[in-house]
Amino acid sequence: MIPVNRPNITEDDIEEVTRVLREGWVSGDAPEVALFETEFAEIHGCAFGVAVPNGSIAIELLLSVMGIGAGDEVILPTFSIISCLAPILRLGAKPIFVDADPHTWNMETGNVEALISPTTKLIMVVHTYGLPVNMAPLMALSKRYGIPLIEDAAESHGLKINDSSCGSFGIASTFSFYANKNVTTGEGGMICTNDEQLYERLKYFRNLTFRDSQRFIHTDLGWNYRFTAIQAALGRSQLRRLKDSIDQRRAIAQKYGAALQDVPGATIAPRKTPYALNDYWVVGIVLEKEKFGPASDVRRKLAESGLQTRPFFFPLHRQPVYLESPSYHSQDLPVADGLHRQGFYPPNGLGSSEKEINDSVQLLGNVLKNWQT
Ligand SMILES: *Cc1c(COP(=O)(O)O)cnc(C)c1O
């Protein structure tokens, strides 16, 4: 089976991890962590980074520290991962979902203004599958209504939107370093910001609300969400290769694109928009229902031929855990529903061999070309 993801861990990465282990300062207080935070934040147009155990905790810590709570409304895309919804529900806030744009699969920015209410406390943007959101209209809304905006940039490390870095637009942005992300530390995450006060509060709550004076007396409840120096060493080494990694993802996407060129009814994620280039974190493919039936039928056939794939997100507004929650309210979001039914992505691991990718491209092309319902 060709796996959907294989991380790329190089000899340099291993050297760097070994170096930190030899140095012996392995905890979250090590200088290595601060170096990774600064280097990663800088690439994303931010002065400060706060590394945490994963991308889901990055969102949860950020929302908690921003004081999101009962009665607050948070606007976010429905076509996204549970990590965006879980903290909203846990904090007792109310998610207000935005449907997807049928072309970019990102949140339909034109639908956001109508969803703003007097209790809207946050706009959460997600750069889906590595194609950045058009930030200009959203930043204008954020400014006009005085509503803070954050970016979940877990799938778009090192990208630009026009001339600004993805992750530098709102009050803060969050990243993940899970094994399938463009910079991996195995597990890991980061919050980036230019707001020094927010930065200090994030660090304080990440570190059990210890203070410099009277260290063991606490006036707030925090968490131990520290990051290890071992992860930081791996992250710094991976970060040095980020440009190459993005180029590699794009080259893989180009191969899939060429194979699907003469397959009517199979659409690959757009290479670019007027404001940004896709990094093809994954190579999303949407199949026409009339020709292929649901994507699950095609995925089953691909699995039989030795190709692992992943379905698209299950829309957040349909998650059983949300339907049961006190924050539930009905919304009709048909584009995201359609994407879930018709979309999937094939293998594109940075650690996959060229042969593995070529085989995968050929297999997918053959199955789709010869498809009969
Ligand atoms: C991967 C991902 C996350 C979650 O990150 P973890 O490190 O796996 O917790 C959150 N948001 C998006 C958009 C992601 O792709």
Image (spheres, rainbow, N blue to C red):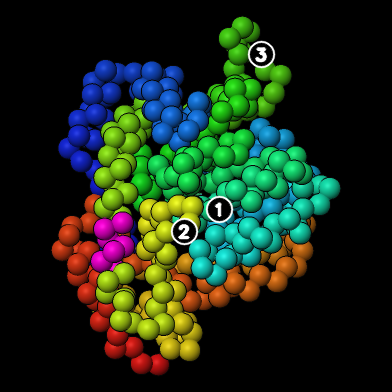
Per the image, is 253 magenta? yes
Asked whether the viewer can see residue 219, the reply is yes
Q: Check mark 1 vs ligand 1: CB closer than 8 Å? yes or no.
A: no
Q: Which residue is mark 1?
A: 134
Relative to 58, 34 lies left or right: left
The 10 Å Cα crowd at callout 2, few under 14, some 14 to 19, many 20 or more, is some
The 10 Å Cα crowd at callout 3, few under 14, some 14 to 19, many 20 or more, is few
The 10 Å Cα crowd at callout 1, few under 14, some 14 to 19, many 20 or more, is many
Q: Residue at x 23, y 24 (%)?
A: 19
Determine the image quadrant of residue 301.
bottom left
Residue range (magenta): 250-256
Q: Badges 3 and 1: C-beta atoms under 8 Å apart?
A: no
Q: Which mark is residue 217?
A: 3
Q: Picture coordinates of residue 310 (x, y %)?
A: 40, 66
Q: Picture coordinates of residue 118 (x, y %)?
A: 84, 48
Q: Which mark is residue 273?
A: 2
Q: Which of pointers 2 and 3 lies earlier in the amino acid sequence?
A: 3
Determine the image quadrant of residue 36.
top left
Q: Nearer the viewer, mark 2 or mark 3?
A: 2
Q: Secondary structure at mark 1?
A: loop
Q: Residue at x 34, y 67 (%)?
A: 346
Rounded to the nearest angstrom, the CA distance separating label 2 from label 1 is 9 Å
Q: Quadrant of the N terminus?
A: bottom left
Residue sitting nearer the eye, 115 or 154: 115
